[in-house]
Amino acid sequence: MSGRAGTLGPAAGPGRHSGRPWGVYVAAAVLSALVATGLAMPHRHRALFAADPPRAPLQAARALRFVELPHDDLAVTDAATGRRVALVAAGENGFLHGMVHGLSATRRRNGVDPARPYALSLYADGRLVLSDPPTGTAIDIEGFGPTNEATLLRFLGSPRVAP
C-alpha cells in the first residue's frame, strides 16, 4: 500500500457518497438491458424471455398496471379496481424494475398505450407468466429464480380464480 489516502476507493466528489445504493442501480440497468435485448429479438431467438404456450389449466390471474413514478419508484395497481397492490421503491427489487422498464420500452416502440394492463397468470402446474397482450410478449418468471417468482406471486394477492 502506498500510504496515500483515498487511492483504493472511488473518487470523492459531489454525489459520490449520497447514501444511494449505486450497486443496485447498476444491477437494475444491466437487467434492463438484458430484458430489453431479449424483448427486441425476433421471437425464435427469445427462448429465455418468451414463455412456452401453457400446457396446464389457468389457476389464477390478475390484470396489473405498472406505473413508473418520480424518483424511480414503481406503483403496481390492480387494473380492475385501481387499488394499489404494491409500491416498490427505487433501489428495491432491481429485477422487477428492469423487467417493467424493458416491457415499457417494447410498448413505446410499438405505440402501445402505457395504461393498458399486463396479465399475471398462474397455471395449475405452478408456472407463473407475465404477459403483455398488446405486444404479444410473455415472460415465464420461473427462469428468473424462486425469489423473483415470489415477488410476482404476492401481486396475485386475492386473484380471480379461473372457472
Image (cartoon, rainbow, N blue to C red):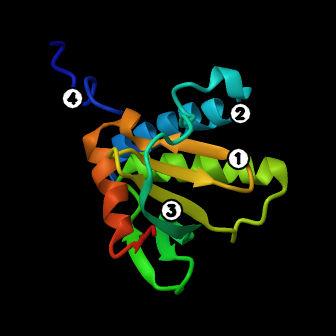
Judged from the image, the secondary structure of the residue bearing numbered disc 4 is loop
Give the image location of residue 98, x and y in percent.
Answer: 50, 46
Marks 1 and 4, the one that precedes in the sequence: 4
Instruction: Specify which label sits upstream in the sequence, 1 or 3.
Output: 3
Q: Looking at this view, is 50 or 100 the one in front?
A: 50
Q: Which residue type carries mark 3?
A: Asp
- Residue 14 visible? The answer is no
The CA distance from mark 2 to mark 3 is 23 Å
Report whether 141 appears left or right of 146: right
10 Å neighbourhood of mark 1: few (<14), some, or many (≥20)?
few
Q: Which residue is mark 1?
A: 136
The image quarter containing residue 133 is: bottom right
Reading the image, the residue beneath label 2 is 40
Left or right: where does residue 149 sit relative to residue 115? left
Mark toward the viewer: 2 or 3? 2
Q: Secondary structure at mark 3?
A: helix
Q: Nearer the viewer, mark 4 or mark 2?
A: 2
Give the number of the mark in front: 1 or 4: 1
Does the rendering let one see residue 32? yes
What amino acid does circle 4 point to? Answer: Ala
Q: In x, y percent, where is residue 134?
A: 74, 56
Mark 4 Cα-neighbour bin, 10 Å: few <14, some 14–19, many ≥20: few
